[in-house]
Image (cartoon, rainbow, N blue to C red):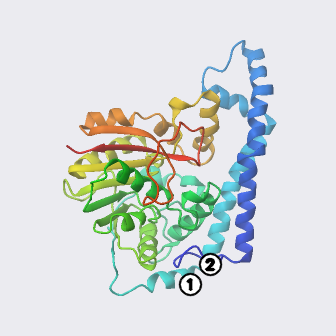
Amino acid sequence: MPRLHPASANIGHDDLSRFQFFLAVRGQVFGPVGQGVETAYKNRVLPKFRSEHGRDPKDATEVRHALEQDEIHQIWSWLRRDSQDLLWLYAGEAVDRQYDSIAETCADIDPAPRGSLTLREGLKPPRYLTEIDTHRMPGNFTTEVRPNDLRAGAVYDLGSAVYQMGLGRKNGQFLNDGRGHTVAAYVMTNFPGFRPKRILDMGCSVGQSTLPYCDYFPDAELTAIDVGAPLLRYAHARAELLGKKVNFVQDDAEHSNFPDASFDLIVSHILFHETSRTAVANIMRETKRLLAPGGVFVHCENPVRIEHLDAYGIAWNGWEQYNNSEPYLLGCAKTDFIGMARELGFENPWAGFIKIVGDARKEKAVEHPPPKGYGYCWYLISGCQG
């Protein structure tokens, strides 16, 4: 297992052992130890709460506070948080050890590239990305410490791909592109005659979910935006080395520089829960402004939805918000996206769970029952421009 793809860090024996250790710990966190937390809640935490208060917890906040007093939950929380930190430590060490080689490989692309890279000098990242390290990745997505820095992109690509390896093969494994395949399958299944000529991926990160659209819509001009220059430098080289044509542009999905009605298909992949509630509304308005008549949008989100979870389920999934630098997760999980789309004037707004797709040419988009957590499906929000 030398590397994930031509642009990525080389994964040596020691790196592989470390990542396997991370996945083993993570398997315990979401397996036996996690099940132990649920058992402890039913057999110990809930009876204790009832004894002290004479009632059941009224909401997920009370469940969370009660759980935090139990030793099994404390062990589980410690393992979950520390395993996340280990992931970024291992990915960061692998990248730092060979950064010069990665940078040289990424710089050594065809002098006549298929796609392009446009960076906006002076673009200020939004506060929701600068005030925390999202996913607890040190430095987040926008930190630069050297000229033409691409470290954040290389670390995120490696770490996030390893993270997805524990969620099943259809999530894209080494390329971590399962969200792109799933959204493309949704478009191809529900709009069979739709042939977009201009596609925009909002908040593309390193382009993992972007690249599948190159194969499914080969005649389309594909543009991908993000605010993080280190991500985009790496994303451009990554796409070129994988033989894909994408125009990467540093821009803000809330207020982009594109003219009205610039795109026929607008997509995003787990962008909303990384942004504030105000930003989500702005991105939806920007989607409306940028979508051409007859166009389609599909925003893909993680499958945690408040309306399908009990108080314990919300507390369990909400752990990410309070302990993993995901402060907007539960706010996103209770957002009425259909209502928002209707207010903006989109036609046929829809939201629901779609089973993960590995290849949109071979699999149709199929609805999935409301899940209890991650790894089985994605939550899609879609609509059309009249």
Q: Are marks 2 and 1 in contact (CB under 8 Å)?
A: yes
Name the image quarter holding the N terminus.
Answer: bottom right
Residue that lies at the very extreme toward the front in this rendered image: 362
Instruction: Specify which label sits upstream in the sequence, 2 or 1.
Output: 2
| Mark in front: 2 vs 1 | 2
Quick one: 274 or 125, which is closer to the camera? 274
Disc 2 secondary structure class: loop
Task: Please name the residue shown 46% across and 74% down the image.
Answer: 238
Task: Write down the residue under mark 1.
Answer: 101
Q: Nearer the viewer, residue 202 or 197?
A: 197
Q: Quadrant of residue 194?
A: bottom left
What is the number of the mark on residue 335?
none
Q: Is residue 282 above or below residue 45?
A: below
Q: Could you classify mark 1 by the number of other residues whose Cα lies within 10 Å: few (under 14), some (14-19), or many (20 or more)?
A: some
What type is the residue that disc 2 sits on? Asn
Residue type at tag 1: Ser
Asked whether, in this view, residue 184 is left or right of residue 27, the answer is: left
- The image quadrant where one finds the C terminus is top left
Height in image: 189 above or below 44? below
Residue where numbered disc 2 is placed: 10
- State the image coordinates of residue 295 (x, y, percent, origin top left): 24, 51
Q: CA distance from mark 2 to mark 1?
A: 9 Å
At 62% across and 78% down in the image, what residue appears?
A: 10
